[in-house]
Amino acid sequence: MNINLNLRILSFNWKISIPKEWVQFAVIVAVLLIATASAYWGSRSILILLLALLLGVAGTLILLKQPNLVFILVLVSGMFIPFAGPGGTNATVFAVVLLIGLWLADLLIVKRNFQLVNSHALLPVMVMLVISLIAFGMGQIPWFVFANQAPLDAQAGGFAIFVLSLGAMLVTANVIKEVRWLEIIVWVFIGFGAIYVFGRFAKLPIDRIYHLGFSAGSMFWTWLVALSFSQIVFNAKLKMPSKVLLSIIVLVTFFVAIVQGYDWKSGWLPPLVAVAVIMGLRYKKFVVFAVPVVLLVVGYLAIKLVATDEYSWGTRVDAWIIVLEISKVSPLFGLGFANYYWYTPLFPIRGFRVSFNSHSQFIDLIAQVGIVGLLCFLWIFFEVGRLSWGLSEKLPDGFTRAYASGVLAGMAGSLMAAFLVDWILPFVYNIGFNGFRASILPWIFFGGLVSIEQIYLGKAKP
């Protein structure tokens, strides 16, 4: 016997069939919690804990029936929930763990069939998970006898960032089977992102509401611009008022990033790359003529950026050289997660024996998971780029075509951000779990692209 509930949220009708056994279980749990609360009446901490448990049980029951809601939870938790646990773990980490856990439980317990959707973009993700596991094992080897290794919790944290990021892409590709859910996720992200940039533009105390780990993440700015601008350019079904609003969002975002925060290159340079890619996709015939101009502009910006912060760029280059030198002892699979940070004092940088990070995603990858890991990382981006290019050519005008183009642009912007700092797979001693709040965005949107591929090929419900 099931109990049927009809919910109407965001103009979508959902019929949720709740098994009678679940209702009985929930009633029993509620009675026990109420009884316990009565016994400890007057203890505020106990009451808060019991209420949290009760809400947790109810929330789990809902999420089991509609796991797509967890994607909204991942976004909202990264933006607003200030909780931070040991090692910087936060609500976003737990939300992604919940997302992966529900998916695995559905595959292994409910369906009893661990089968992934068929996509070339997911093969390098699986290979990267294996490489990460090998690198974690390599990290237990004392590569330098005169230096300490990273603590096990730091190594486990670095490993977890890789696993959760890659896992989020796998889950998104396999769980989202309807375009409308991808639309909800994208518009929720753009909506909350717009509120933030408008607040910054108006110089309101918006940072008191949004978590700095999210709003100060390059991936937030990159993907807000990439997805918004692609909908303006490629979504022919989008009404003009919506396009005007999105145009204002993009312009305000660049104003805040460039005018109010010019010195922070990661806030405006990657989004600028994303816009350039979208314009190239829109006006392919003019790309050949535009290349010389783009090269001149890029060259000018590069020279100007280096000139305005010569010392910073100089020390970065020094750090890259030293980290690559350290990585020579294990070039294929790296030194393991977080270890090179503890080895750097053996190699003085400008006369100082200190621990430092590379400030580059690519150098970090070589040091942590080796050349093999770096090549696999680039393989993931190549497959995502190839898929997004193909879908942007084949899909009809509308949200999905714009989304595919936006992912290609966001991917290009993300690669630029990776050159600047470890924004995509945060290094545990730099961007870390705090930056994971925003770094999870490209992995979810990459997975959404694979989901569209499955829907377009007729392998999932349209």
Image (cartoon, rainbow, N blue to C red):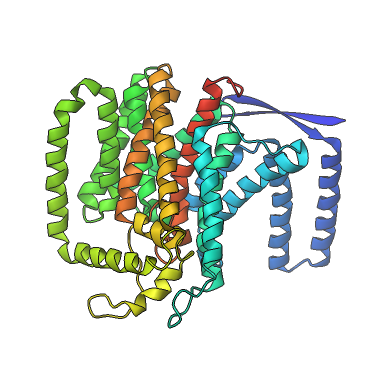
Which residue is found at the position 33% from the left and 56% from the top? 421
Which residue is found at the position 28% from the left and 33% from the top? 277
Q: Quadrant of residue 235?
A: top left
Counting from the top left corner in percent of width and height, residue 371 is at 40, 55
| Residue 270 drawn above or below residue 187 | below
Counting from the top left corner in percent of width and height, residue 278 is at 29, 30
Residue toward you, 54 or 419? 419
Q: Quadrant of residue 321?
A: bottom left
Q: Is residue 388 left or right of residue 87?
A: left
Q: Is residue 191 left or right of residue 309?
A: right
Quadrant containing the N terminus is: top right
Q: Quadrant of residue 65?
A: top right
Counting from the top left corner in percent of width and height, residue 340 is at 41, 69
Counting from the top left corner in percent of width and height, residue 121 is at 49, 36
Residue toward you, 303 or 79? 303
Residue toward you, 128 or 35? 128
> Looking at the image, can residue 203 be seen?
no
Quadrant containing the C terminus is: top right
| Residue 383 drawn above or below residue 52 | above
Residue toward you, 416 or 318? 318
| Residue 410 drawn above or below residue 40 | above
Q: Is residue 365 left or right of residue 4?
A: left
